[in-house]
Amino acid sequence: MKIGVLALQGAFSEHLKILRCFQNLETVEVRQPVQLLDLCGLIIPGGESTTILKLMGLYRLDTMLADLCARGFPIWGTCAGAILMAGEVGNTNPNMPAGLGLMKITVRRNAFGRQVDSFEEKLRVPVLGDKPFPAVFIRAPLIESSEPPAEVLARLGNRAIVAVRQDNLLATTFHPELGDDDRFHQYFVSMAETYQAYHTNF
Ligand code: GLN
């Protein structure tokens, strides 16, 4: 099975490093639409959401992803990637093109302040088991609200929503690829395995 990481800008190599430790999994740095065709999932990494979105449009990755998404293809957006997944984005650059708009969530960019206000916090994430997950927030967005079928997976201190799943889609406002806890990656790999079992011939 192959999982891709969008490799246009941002923290893609850290995701690849974690995925390469999984057995029976091939990884691909995705830069062209054709590379999506034999994948069972795609991670959109953290970075700078305006830049990533502009490059996705330039390479026509945005339209292809929307088509694949409608067929159940798993996509996980982390931090800037989560911003791109959102149906609505506040505090955005007025020149920013519309995001992918795939999930029923409203996201506010840079909700915790500037780069220097970045922080780490242990999160309770019931779908990952009892052990708290160490989450790194770097100039992170916040999920202000979510609507079904999007389901909240984790909150920061019982309030702010920071991880959401909507069927084949996952959004986390922090960076699960920074650190040595790979449970979020395992969780996404299992979403990709489900997709492979039901949707592909490879
Ligand atoms: N602040 C960035 C943005 O709005 C996201 C930061 C990140 O991905 N770590 O695009």
Image: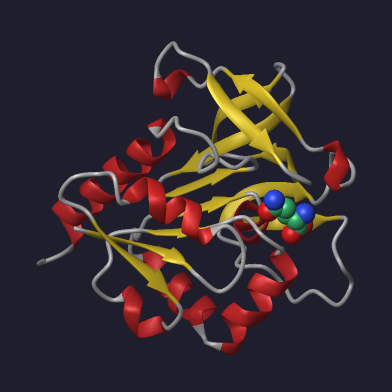
Identify whether 15 is placed above or below 122. Answer: below
Q: Is residue 123 left or right of residue 168?
A: right
Task: Please state the horizontal and vertical placement of residue 180, each as a whole percent of the image.
Answer: 45, 32
Task: Please state the horizontal and vertical placement of residue 123, each as a whole percent of the image.
Answer: 60, 21
At x 72%, y 38%, the residue is 145
Viewer-proximal residue among 26 and 38: 26
Residue 160 occupies quadrant: top right
Q: Is residue 86 left or right of residue 28?
A: right
At x 84%, y 47%, the residue is 115
- On-image quarter of the C terminus: bottom left
Task: Please state the horizontal and vertical placement of residue 74, each as a whole percent of the image.
Answer: 37, 55
Task: Please state the horizontal and vertical placement of residue 59, each as a whole percent of the image.
Answer: 53, 87
Identify whether 130 is placed above or below 176. Answer: above
Q: How many marks?
A: 0
Question: Looking at this rendering, what residue extends furthest in the left direction?
Answer: 201
Q: Is residue 35 left or right of residue 90?
A: left
Question: Looking at this rendering, what residue extends furthest in the top direction?
Answer: 130
Identify whether 54 is placed above or below 118. Answer: below
At x 42%, y 73%, the residue is 30
Q: Colour scheme in the image?
A: secondary structure
For ligand 1, give the image quadrant. Answer: bottom right
Identify whether 165 is placed above or below 125. Answer: below
At x 54%, y 53%, the residue is 77
Residue 1 occupies quadrant: bottom left
Residue 134 occupies quadrant: top right
